[in-house]
Image (spheres, rainbow, N blue to C red):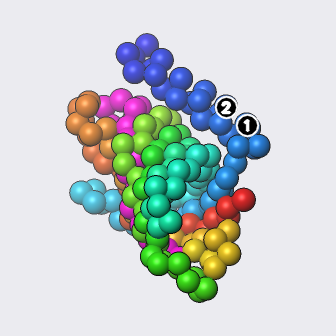
Amino acid sequence: MRSIFPACRLLSLSILMFLSSAVLADELSVNAGFGGQAGAGQDNWGGGLDWEFWRHARSERQFLSIGAGYTHIRTDAATNKKLSAFSLYPQLTLLANKRNAWQPYFFVRALGPTFLSSEKLGEREQGERFAFQAQVGGGLIAPSEDWFVALSYKHFSNAELFSPNDSMEIQFLVTVGKRW
């Protein structure tokens, strides 16, 4: 077996443990999107589910959180047509000033360890099934702060830890979520 496989099994088991404990759930969101794959002649479509289970307020307008996510990506390439990704991710969220209307926010995720179901998606290839998730986006939070919508860009790569390191991405992702 590959040297990275035990770490990926541990990551997958950790995600399943977190997802099986609904008592800890704080925020759940669903997403769907599409876009051309940079550097390849293929289009990708994807969807997924994200669960934020820990959040720390650094201030009234800045949050650091940790979550787990599942992303399923399909492509129109002739081979290697689908891939699933299981991720843990840190997220930094920055809010605009609070007011009694929908409030803009910005978020960034980086270096979220990810287990990929395959090393290939269409023409793209990772050297191993281990990668990192990066995501950047912005959106609006309801005045009650329990609902939100966002537009974002999601990217998976192995950060040059293995060769090859072709990125896999969804360029335009729409997310709708709920906080408890």
Label 1: state its secondary structure.
helix
Which of these two is toward me, 59 or 173?
59
Main SS category, magenta section? strand
- Residue 93 is left or right of residue 71, and the answer is left
Q: Give the residue at mark 2.
A: 17
Answer whether residue 95 is visible to the viewer in this image.
yes
Q: Quadrant of the C terminus?
A: bottom right
Seen in the picture, residue 30 relative to 24 is either above or below; the reply is below
Seen in the picture, residue 44 relative to 160 is either above or below; the reply is below
Q: Residue at x 55, y 46 (%)?
A: 67
x, y (%) of residue 33? 50, 66
Q: Which residue is drawn at 45% across and 76% down?
A: 96
Q: In which quarter of the image is the N terminus?
A: top left
Which of these two is toward me, 126 or 25?
25
- Residue 165 is left or right of residue 98, and the answer is left
- Label for residue 20? 1
Label 2: state its secondary structure.
helix
Magenta stretch: residue 179 in it? Answer: no
Query: In which quarter of the view is residue 68 placed?
Result: top right
x, y (%) of residue 121? 40, 46
Q: Residue at x 31, y 38 (%)?
A: 158
Q: Are marks 1 and 2 in contact (CB under 8 Å)?
A: yes
